[in-house]
Amino acid sequence: MKKIILLVLSFMCMGMIGANGQSKDVYFIFDSPKQVELKNSKAEEIAKNLKLESEDGDVYDAVVNVIDNKKIAISPIEKIDEKLKIKDVSDYKISDYEGNIYVQNESNLKKISKYLQRNRGPVMPLYSVDESVVAESGVAAKSADSNQSAKTSENRSDDYSKTNVQTQGVDEADIVKTDGKNIYCINDGDLLIVDANTKNMQVKSKIETKKRKTLNNIYIDNNKLSLIYAYNEYKDDNYKNVTLVDTYDVSNASKPKLLNSKSAKGFIYESRKKGDIIYTVTSDYFNTKYKETPNILYKRGFYTSPSYEFDSTGIDLKKMIYMPFNPSEEITYITAMQTTTSKNNNELLYMGSSGDIYMSTDNIYISTPIYEYNYKTYEFREGTGIKKIAVDKMDFNYSGYCEFEGSILNQFSMNENDGNLFVAYTKYQYDDKSENAVASYDKNMKKLSELDGLAKGERIYSVRFIKDKAYLVTFKQVDPLFVIDLKNPKNLKVLGYLKIPGYSEYLHPYKDNYLIGFGQNTANKGERVVNDGFKMSLFDISDFNNPKEVDTESIGAKGTYSAIENDHKALMFDERRNIFAIPMYVTRLEKKLDSSPIVPTFSGVYVYDISEKGFDIKGRISHYTEKQQASAKYDVYDYERQIQRSVQIGDNLYTVSEYGIKVNDINTLKEIATLEFE
């Protein structure tokens, strides 16, 4: 009898256990890409019809890549809390997969569009670009030192302001640039090249923008002027979004010579420049093909969305990277363009959107906001994903991805130091339970540490990373400035903090031991805290444990603001002379009552001297006439005179608006010359 029982148990075990010792029904948590090693099946056959099944019998799809004849890699489309197994497949081994997963084929694309249709409803029928819309053309220029533009010379011949950027050696595009000889500015959609010689200040040349093109931003470096355009064409019932980069030789600024015209797929989102290579980040969408009318349908009183599929014509799915839990109708392209030659572009593309962009000297980091609503639990999730792309001149390498609960503020929320990424973010920012955190990730984007619980009930208003320290400003009723030690990425800690009224929305480093905060004054009105004019603060951070506010400067009443609060490129900072200029819109209360209307009193630029002791105003510059300024309503009628940027060349300060350029002595602010654009 015992022998019979043992024999029966033996057969039962053989039915449950494979020869390799693993159960035939291998259940696993599908929280990251996995490698599936098959024993008795061919990878391509399994990949065609692969389904995942939960212990309750629910069936799910996955993005599948064939590695070899016996191995496949799978990546999750949606978050699933249950344990899963591969349906109708036995004898396989599961392990984590560290390589890239690609959309790869139409089968995976259909799974993704099916999920989006089921969970997000209809998408707009936007269309992907045809690679042949704009052909690359041009003549190769003489070779140049690709690192020359990334260095800041200390010679007096280089005595002119540069665009205020986040990373030294990585340029950022702007609407106004100078090379010390000329001023290059976007005006009424065209590009003007203006001679900066005050004795003969004039428009040397004009590069007109053709139809269906919008001039977005510019770069200037070593007599090479690059213009970045958004180009949109409607043809054959299709929208085609293209980003164009035209590069001119401006050695003779009176006669710019087109060197080459290059294009990237999609609509321009952001760009960076290192040496003679421009990196663009652009967005596009799959062509959406509806099986029914794209109108909202109602059947028997229930909402029904039309079924659709993505058309991948002109898109190489084998090169499109897929990140786990990131199904999307959107495509992001990162394109490298060498401006000095006619060499072909190189691109990397992934499925998904793009958010804030940060570029170190070696890597591009692209954030993506994540908004999810769980229809079962009725819970809303707000998160952020960050992709890391290694850059080596024209070559890209996707290096990893991280995801966390919470939202970042802007590009300054990210920073790389010694190969590690540091991120500052706010959790539950739309909730009274909000809190702030700083996290660190290694070179493979694996989480090292998180310092959370900072300033509960508040959110981040500004961030600045400097070497191995992070400076955070949070706000709800007062403005705490936190100093975070990043020296040990595995053990982040608060060194000190300072609480003061108001808040800073942009932090700018000054010398080695100071920070300038640009933001808003605040006032308590009963239970409410309201803005009460513009504020600048100078912080002494030499003692990390005890940061101090050395000096403050207040301007105007509520409604007063500066573009520097949300655009760091609006700041002109002359480090040699310790002078800076910021655009200002200033108001006052019509009467001495909080409820009285606000009246504009000034629109232009404020110019300051700065030292370790604090701020000293030099004066103000405006492009409005005295009569307009006296009317107190001038800016409502004449937006062209609002100053957009300031640039410094030698002892001259140039302020630029759509109206024209005014030149003042940077030391005395005495007016020297004015050029009115036609």
Image (cartoon, rainbow, N blue to C red):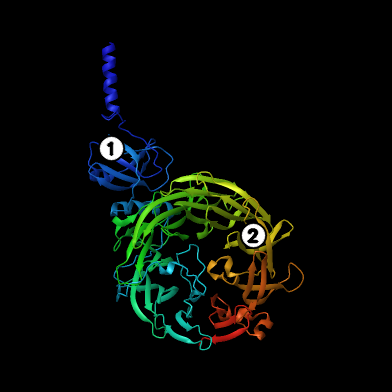
Q: Report the front residue among 109 and 308.
A: 109
Residue 485 visible from this viewpoint = yes
Indicate which disc, 2 or 1, sits on the residue closer to the N terminus.
1
In this image, 319 relative to 227: left or right?
left
Q: Percent from the top left, x then y, of residue 461?
A: 59, 58
Q: Which residue is mark 2?
A: 539
Residue 633: assigned label? none
**Mark 2–mark 1 distance (CA, rounded to whole Å):** 64 Å
Q: Report the front residue among 488 and 6.
A: 488
Residue farthest toward the front in the current orientation of the protein: 155
**Mark 2, mark 1: which one is toward the viewer?**
2
Tell me the SS state at disc 1. Answer: loop
Q: Tell me how many marks there are.
A: 2
**Which residue type does callout 1 highlight?**
Val
Residue 308 visible from this viewpoint = no
**Which residue type does callout 2 highlight?**
Phe
Residue farthest toward the right in the current orientation of the protein: 592
Q: Percent from the top left, x then y, of residue 284?
A: 38, 64
Give neighbour class at mark 1: few <14, some 14-19, many 20+ (Cα, 10 Å): some
Q: Percent from the top left, x then y, of residue 628?
A: 65, 84
Q: Quadrant of the N terminus?
A: top left
Decide: is 141 above or below 432.
Answer: below
Give neighbour class at mark 2: few <14, some 14-19, many 20+ (Cα, 10 Å): many
Which quadrant of the structure image shows residue 619? bottom right
Q: Percent from the top left, x then y, of residue 110?
A: 32, 53
In this image, 543 relative to 278: left or right?
right
Decide: is 3 above or below 573.
Answer: above
Q: Which residue is mark 1?
A: 89
Tell me the SS state at disc 2. Answer: strand
Task: For the residues labelled 2 and 1, say whether their Cβ atoms are less than 8 Å apart.
Answer: no
